Amino acid sequence: MYADGGEIVQHTPRFVRDTSKYWYKPHISREEAIQILKDKPPGTFVVRDSNSFPGAFGLALKVAHLPPNVNPKPGDPQTDLVRHFLIEGTNKGVRLKGCSNEPVFGSLAALVYQHSITPLALPCKLLLPDYDSTDLDGNSTLKSEAPSSAAQLLAQGAACNVLYIHSLDMESLTGPEAVTKAVKTVFLTKPPPKTTVVHFKVSGQGITLTDNKRRLFFRRHYPVNAVTFCGMDPSDRRWTQKDGDVSITANAKIFGFVARKPGSATDNACHLFAEIDPDQPASAIVNFVTKVMIGHGKFKS
């Protein structure tokens, strides 16, 4: 998700898996990418260096169907099925440009492997190749499932900083009703609860919160099988309090996740947060958590 301290990928990146040589083709052109992919199965892709935007990357992806708002061009219809996306650098990593619900990833490899697990804003999942897609005579198959290294990458997780507001017991209540009740309770609490900025990390193992300043706690972990819901405040209330040097604006949206309490099969707690980074809006965080949980069979899409 949100970058975990990664630098902007501006030059040839170091990948976590050797198969990157099969899909990272820095010097090919847009037209060459189309010729490589047009006869390949949906999900086949290559990543190249962008000629128009220095430091950015072009993702060329073969899809099954044209988007509804795109009219086919004269000529080979297969060429229209190769769609192009720009991967831009930010001060925290890389992300798909123009997709507000897409997180920032700490590396190009992290972005590719996560989109092989779930498509997020892409039309389909990326199919990780086990051969060089630029070899038009290649006979090997594409892997539709993420390899073990992708699972390891997800296990490392990705994260951002958010404002931790409070945790409240919900008994058996979960879902958006639990978030609604928790936010209402917090807004009625006088004085308001003490808050702290936490490192919010999502991985295949669950959600980990780290209070680096140790104001309220040090670290808390919520296993993936304990998390039952993550969502925005249904009432769309905003958090306006300041926390030390961190200024929370009137537009800071609130979100929360619900997790079963340790040792209980029925009792839940709702944990509330507010966004603090414009590059990491609450909607993107919720979207990422939900997609990861879907990937593990936790939530239904």
Image: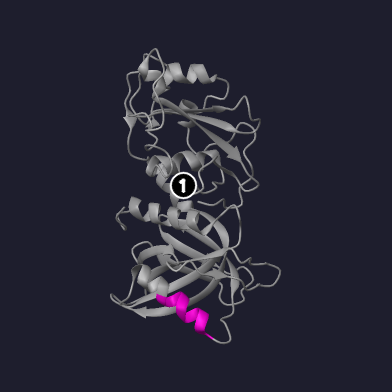
Q: Determine the image quadrant of residue 62.
A: top left
Front residue (pair 233, 122): 233
Q: Is residue 263 above or below residue 4?
A: below
> Would residue 258 be found to the left or right of residue 90 on screen?
left
Q: What residue is rendered at 48% in x and 52% in y?
A: 156
User: For mark 1, what is the residue?
Assistant: 153
x and y percentages locating residue 213 in the rendered image: 64, 71
Is residue 115 one of those drawn in magenta? no
Q: What residue is rendered at 58% in x and 21% in y?
A: 27
> Would residue 230 be found to the left or right of residue 99 on screen?
left
In the image, farthest residue toward the right: 245
Front residue (pair 94, 242): 242
Q: Is residue 85 above or below residue 120?
A: above
x and y percentages locating residue 301 in the rendered image: 31, 52
> Would residue 161 be found to the left or right of residue 36 on screen?
right
Q: What residue range appears in magenta?
A: 181-189
Secondary structure at numbered mark 1:
helix
Q: What residue is rendered at 51% in x and 69% in y?
A: 237
x and y percentages locating residue 172 in the rendered image: 30, 77
Q: Is residue 62 above or below residue 285?
A: above
Identify the main secondary structure in magenta. helix
Q: What residue is rendered at 57% in x and 50% in y?
A: 3
In the image, farthest residue toward the bottom: 190
Is residue 187 one of those drawn in magenta? yes
Amino acid on which disc 1 is placed: Leu
Q: How is the image coloured?
A: one colour
Count of picture labels: 1
x and y percentages locating residue 282 in the rendered image: 51, 59
